[in-house]
Image (cartoon, grey):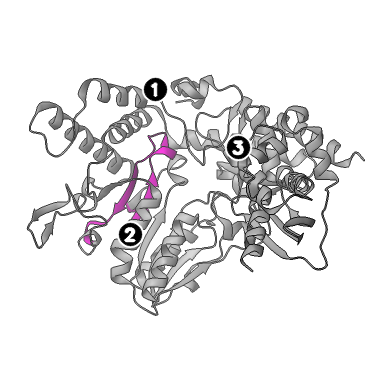
Amino acid sequence: MSASLYQENLIEHFKYPQNKKILEHPDFVVHEHNPSCGDRVSMQGCLTNGVLTEVGFQGSGCVISQAAASMLTEHCLGKDIAAILALSADDMTALVGIPLGPTRLKCAILCLHALQQGLRDYLKQ
Amino acid sequence: MSCSTLRKDFPLINRIQGAYLDNAATAHKPQAMLEAMAAFYEHDYATVNRGLYAAGEQATAACEQTRARVAQLINATPHEVIFTSGTTQSINLVASSWALQHCRAGDQIVLTEAEHHANLLPWQEVAAKTGAQLVFIPLDRSSLQLVDATPYITPRTKLVAVTLSSNVLGDVWPAGYLHACIDKAHAVGAVVLLDAAQAIAHQPVDVQALNADFLAFSAHKLFGPTGLGVLFAKQSLQETMQPYQRGGSMVYEAHFDHAVWQKGPAKFEAGTPPIAAIIGFGATLAYLQKTISWPAVQEHETALCRQLLAGLQKLPRVTIVGNPAVIAAHGHLVSFVVAGIHAHDIASALGSQGIAVRAGHLCAQPLVDALGFNSLVRVSVALYSNEQDIALFLQTLEQTIGLFTNILEQP
């Protein structure tokens, strides 16, 4: 069951999250939560010449919400703002690697909303 | 009647591979309802309250027959039964058409801590618009039962709007407390609204015995169609209420610059109603009236709850969120958490095995927050649920907890 429900990769990211840290001088910090289940993710990042050079997340919640945040930080590190803002829910599903219904999709894209909001806030500054 | 024999009357419940245990969210439908709705669309379709032709007259009569059946179900008179789109709209109707006219700054609206968002957010809006104040009857944190409500009801109380049964905890009223609450409300001149969304499918609901002024429920939780609900409103109150929406059907006479409303319940039923749903609900009610007795339903459902409690109490990491003694005596749902495993992960794992349960804050976020959780798993039964459903759920939950424990604890 675990194999069909959650891929090993997803579990690995949940148990050993990448970039789960607090940055000392972030250019943006954004908190997001999923009101229907209480998942929480906050994203921080540093940008240099429009490229995400440092990223960190904090959070609590279900396996998918936390593993997705870890995967997203890994995926986005070193990418430019436009590339990250172009990421869609479909890209997030591909990253997570398992089919997600509409309810679980919200868990998976919570971190993407936070990161993209952070970048938009940064661009407005 | 035996609940084990009526499961066959719910075709989808019989076809489901797994177990459907999300009945507090919505209940499945008897064959009688499906046939009535199909027959209406296939053979008898027409609108109501207008057509001077046979099909129109028949549809009108069929809808009024459902109104009479609803009245019989809750011991009201038919003109006290208003059709709405569901519990949510029923309560919003009272908020908009009664409370906004009658509440003033300094008045108090008394609720419980255990309300569903549908019986909380409309009153927040009334409070914001009128300056009335919301007062909450607290839950005792150890028994998860409401404390004595009477001290919270004062001469400033204008409305007491409380649930008959919580969608998170089940019954929250110690014996006699609800009646004392309603009596005190009436003694201070307040009006009482009862949210029967959960109670309606599990116990007899008698508006006269309860002495309710308003009572709301949805058809779909009582084995009827979605998109249809009921608001019981005492006739004397209907006369003091504004229409909820204005348009067709609800007007007595209309001029270019003004209009005169019909009397209730038509005054509150603007536009073409969900005719097929009303006819379908009539068939459901006729089926229930012919087939069930509430004492037998309660005996059946509490036996399933005892099976659930006994199984859950044996599982590692599981904490029941509710009062086990109350659930064992007259419950229809059990909420719980699993330490270290998010409710969504549990519900997804169960869902992948065909077992439908609910996870989240259950549309009662302030309550779930106040109890110190952010997400619960809820298992809820109906009259067609059986021991195999519960056994399959418990067995799958045990496997799920075992798998997650292995995954999370392995280095």
Looking at the rendered image, the quarter that the N terminus of chain A falls into is top right
* Spot occupied by residue A86 in the image (x, y as percentages of width and height): 63, 46
Q: Would you say residue B117 is visible in this rendering?
A: yes
Callout 1 amino acid: Gln
Q: Nearer the viewer, residue B45 or B328?
A: B45
Image side of residue A25 versus residue B394, left or right: right
Residue B321 visible? The answer is no
Q: How far apart are marks 2 and 3 (CA)?
A: 31 Å
Mark 1 vs mark 3, foreground winner is: 3
Name the chain letter of the residue that bears numbered label 1.
Answer: B
Asked whether A59 or B97 is in front, the reply is A59
Q: What stretch is highlighted in magenta?
A: B208-236
User: Which residue is pictured at 74% across the width and 46% down the height?
Assistant: A72
Q: In which quarter of the image is residue B107?
A: bottom left
In the picture of the structure, the residue carrying the numbered disc 3 is B357
Dots 1, 2 in contact, CB < 8 A? no
Q: Closest to the observer: B364 or B390?
A: B364
**Numbered mark located on residue B94 in the image:** 2
- Amino acid carrying mark 3 in the image: Val
Q: Is mark 3 on a helix, strand or loop?
A: loop
Q: What residue type is labelled 2?
A: Val
Q: Are marks 2 and 3 in contact (CB under 8 Å)?
A: no
Residue found at x 37% / y 79%: B105
Q: Which comes before the other along the chain, label 1 or label 3?
A: 1
Q: Quadrant of the C terminus of chain A?
A: bottom right
Tags 1 and 3 touching, CB below 8 Å? no
Image quadrant where residue B226 sits: top left
Mark 3 neighbour class, 10 Å CA radius: few under 14, some 14 to 19, many 20 or more: many
Residue position for label 1: B31
Let me know if residue B87 is in the magenta part: no
